[in-house]
Amino acid sequence: MALSEQRIAEIQERLKDLSPEEQQQKLQEILKELPQDELNEITQQQCPFCGIVEKKIDAKTVYEDGIVMAVLDINPANKGHVILFPKKHYQFLFQVSDTEVAYMFKMINKISLAMVNGLNAEGNNIFVANGQIAGQNASHVIVHIIPRYKDDGIDFKWDFKKVNDEEMLNLVSAIKKSIVTHKEVKVNKKTNSNHKEKERIA
């Protein structure tokens, strides 16, 4: 459902005569009031990956079909670093249906193998950032496929944390209790500080 010109004019009217700081605050209030379909449309209009899908933003395309697109990352960890994403707008990987996720990873495997055969990569990393706190910079699911070579300087190491047996059991219990199907998924408000509203996935 497209935002009507009248709806856009209403929003602009509420923002006029405000300072930039007041506009930002008022805009956040307006976004919380919007129906989910209108909020989704605004998010998509601002999403660079939706812009790539719609051919409004140029990209070096490695693969494209009706479901996914894979392009070269413009800020690569290594030459040949590819990002793959669904054409349909989703903010988080857990919002994507099981069927689409399976298809995405089928294509990720093909690109991963192509890196080994075509770029003489010695391996690769497959990486997803789910949420701003995890390093997600745009509100669209993307999967990084990074070709790896000996002494390439990329470091995914982290400091290990000590967890005792009781904490392990509590963690297992909390995760098991919260495993749900896609039809039950709700987005936690804490997942992304720029995504304040609750979203129910049908």
Image (cartoon, rainbow, N blue to C red):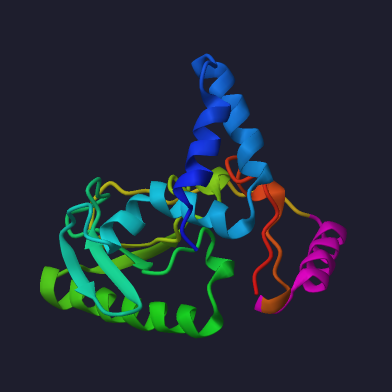
* Residue 107 figure quarter: bottom left
Identify which residue, 6 or 40, lies in the foreground.
6
Give me the residue at 43% from left, 48% from top.
Answer: 138
* Residue 174 figure quarter: bottom right
Q: Is residue 122 left or right of residue 4?
A: left
Q: Which residues are magenta?
A: 164-182
Identify which residue, 12 or 103, lies in the foreground.
12
Q: Main secondary structure of the magenta part?
A: helix
In the rendered image of this protein, does residue 95 appear above or below residue 140?
Answer: below
Residue 17 at x, y = what percent? 52, 16
Residue 85 at x, y = what percent? 37, 66
Give me the residue at 48% from left, 52% from top.
Answer: 4
Whether residue 130 is visible to the viewer of this picture, yes or no, is no
Residue 83 at x, y = what percent? 31, 61
Residue 81 at x, y = what percent? 24, 58
Q: Does the magenta segment cover residue 173?
A: yes
Give me the residue at 49% from left, 38% from top.
Answer: 9
Q: Is residue 77 left or right of residue 129?
A: left
